[in-house]
Image (cartoon, grey):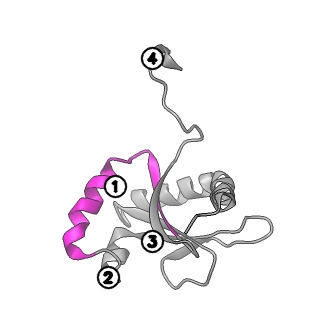
Amino acid sequence: MEVPFEKYLQLEDDLRRYRKALNQALDVMLDQEISNYPIFLLHQQELAMGVNVIEAGEQTGLWSVNASSLEEFALKGLIEPEKIADFQKVYKEHTDSFCLFVLSELGAQFIFYPRADHLYTEYGTLN
């Protein structure tokens, strides 16, 4: 099945608007030691998981966002116990990114999205 490109563009557009709120929520979760592995769930349907951070709407965008964690994912059986160490390793490789779990009619997938507004890193004189 081919994924509609427009779906990714809408997600990217909403994520740009959500970046400040996601940064604040991530900082709170880390500062209050709620989890060392926060995960944001992006969805367009009712979801009984995590804590609501952003509700989809005319002013906010098409996607709702809930804050969750690796611990909740493991507790609910969404990440198998033998895969937790692998997940933690990948998570630590993306310290400058949000860990997103995107649920849509296209399926469910983890995405690491940059916390900063720029989407590239400068490499000497190449940029």
Residue at 65% across, 57% down: 5
3D distance between C-alphas at marks 1 and 3 = 14 Å
Instruction: Name the disc covering residue 77, or none.
Output: 2
Camera-side mark, 1 or 3: 1
In percent of the image, x 49 and y 18: which residue is there? 126
- Graded by Cα atoms within 10 Å as few (under 14), some (14 to 19) or many (20 or more), the crowding at tag 1 reads many
Residues rendered magenta in the picture: 80-102
Q: CA distance from mark 2 to mark 3?
A: 14 Å
Place residue 1 in its image quadrant. bottom right
Name which residue type carries label 3.
Ser
The residue singled out by tag 4 in the image is 124
Q: Is residue 126 left or right of residue 30?
A: right
- Disc 1 versus disc 4: distance between alpha carbons? 27 Å
Q: Secondary structure at mark 2?
A: loop
Q: Position of residue 84 (x, y in %)?
A: 25, 67
Residues packed near mark 2 inside 10 Å, few (<14), some (14 to 19) or many (20 plus): few
Query: In the image, what residue type sits under mark 1?
Result: Tyr
- Residue 101 in magenta stretch: yes
**Distance of mark 2 from mark 1, alpha carbons?**
18 Å
Contact flag, marks 1 and 4 (Cβ < 8 Å): no
Question: Which is closer to the viewer, label 2 or label 3?
Answer: 2
Q: Which residue is mark 1?
A: 91
Secondary structure under the numbered disc 4 in the rendered image: helix
